[in-house]
Amino acid sequence: MEFLDNPDKDGFYGTFGGAFVPECLKAEFENITAAFLNCKKDVKFHAELSDLYTHYVGRPSPVYFAKNLSRKYGADLYLKREDLNHTGAHKINHCLGEALLAKRMGKKKLIAETGAGQHGVALATAAAFVGLECDIYMGAVDVAKEKPNVDRMKLLGAKVISVTSGTQTLKDAVDAAFEVYSKTYPDVLYAIGSVVGPHPFPMMVEYFQSIVGKEARAQFTELTGSLPECVIACVGGGSNALGIFNGFLHDPSVALFGVEPLGKGTSLGSHAASITYGKEGILHGFKNLVLQDEHGNVANAYSIASGLDYPGVGPKHCYLKTIGRVHYDTVSDAEALDAFFELSRTEGIIPALESAHAVAYAVRLAKEKKFRKILVNLSGRGDKDVEYVLGLKRTVAVSK
Ligand SMILES: *Cc1c(COP(=O)(O)O)cnc(C)c1O
């Protein structure tokens, strides 16, 4: 199969991607690209990262045969257990890569924005380990909502900056963090939390996540004697999906499915399915499929899984959709919630609400009987969601 693994020198995958940054930052993004390409070639960098993956993160994460779920639905379902990583999700894979890169570049500080706090916690962890300062920008509304993650970031030594402009949520946190970054970049790396943002971040974050697919391909083959018939992952910005897809992109026999959050329904503002419903546009410095109204105003993104509610998506996903290599489909809040309970009860694994979208889609495909060997990327664990989900159940019980 003939297609682009890497972007062109300007960071484009077909028509998507690029680096639309202010003039003053252009040279800095070129520096980051050069530093990353050097690290990629450097045996010592690989040795350091690989040692961290083994002894700090706990890699390789297992591929697990979900016996009970498989029996129930009549297809063999396997889970790549990224939920077992240190800090509970796949995000630590690229946060450690970015932190090591920052250290190599002689930076003193990592900064980032966070919505629900998952990226903030993973980055604060990596910063603590590598010995860098860490400033996390967070909308004031989110700071109040996500107290446990705010406390964790502080405990890990990060500074949490509460942003009180605009709607006081993720978008305002991005704006505030970027404004500070554009004045302080000589000492700072802006560590983006997914395969989004200006070039080279989509390429770089994908590279750090590709360990997931590399492991999964070898483990699945060893366990079953063949490749999976399909691989499923949820798509927010798209990093866990590209991570696992990387092991199978060049295997034409393996169907790949990216699952977007349909939230409460198909109307603009009720979901975060950017590939399915978005239109080409530039958001946060790169060209991608953006949820927007007919005047080009960026829409609010919504999902029950806060890690999925981004109104854009990684440029490589837009490209993979265009060439037809990956199929993109949607799963609603309600279906994800059902899968959250189902996996907990049948396998004793509480998935993150994000990952529950992929599990729900696996169950859907199993019921359709088109695939018999299915691999799901379980991107994270659901401890963070338990209180919220049980609160929902109580609300539903009272309203009935
Ligand atoms: C952040 C997050 C996601 C969404 O991010 P991607 O970049 O699309 O992978 C998915 N699952 C979990 C558990 C997350 O924390």
Image (spheres, rainbow, N blue to C red):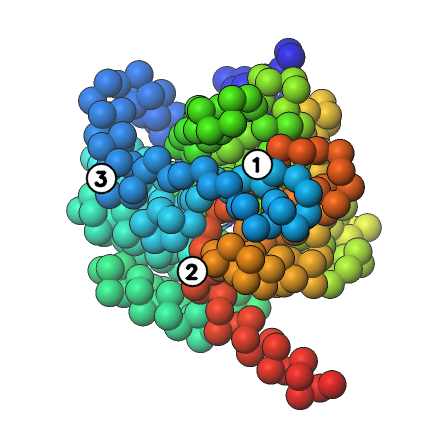
Chain-order first, disc 3 or disc 1: 3
Residue type at tag 3:
His
- Crowdedness near tag 3: few (<14), some (14–19) or many (≥20) residues, C-alpha within 10 Å: few
- How far across and down, in percent of the image, does residue 49 sit? 26, 32
Element type at marker 1?
Answer: strand
- Crowdedness near tag 2: few (<14), some (14–19) or many (≥20) residues, C-alpha within 10 Å: many
Q: Which residue is mark 2?
A: 117
Residue name at image x 22 percent, y 32 percent: 51
Name the quadrant containing residue 154: bottom left
Residue name at image x 48 percent, y 74 percent: 387
| Quadrant housing the C terminus | bottom right
- How far across and down, in percent of the image, does residue 217 sit? 48, 26
CA distance separating discs 3 and 1: 25 Å
Q: Is mark 1 within 8 Å of ligand 1?
A: no
Query: In the figure, is residue 252 to the left or right of 207?
Result: right
Q: Which residue is mark 3?
A: 55
Query: In the figure, is residue 104 to the left or right of 374?
Result: left
Q: Are marks 3 and 1 in contact (CB under 8 Å)?
A: no
Residue type at tag 2:
Gly
Q: Which residue is mark 1?
A: 375
Q: Are marks 2 and 1 in contact (CB under 8 Å)?
A: no
Chain-order first, disc 2 or disc 1: 2
Query: Looking at this view, is 220 or 392 the one in front?
Result: 220
Farthest residue, direction front: 71
Residue name at image x 40 percent, y 39 percent: 62
Query: Looking at this view, is 148 or 338 the one in front?
Result: 338
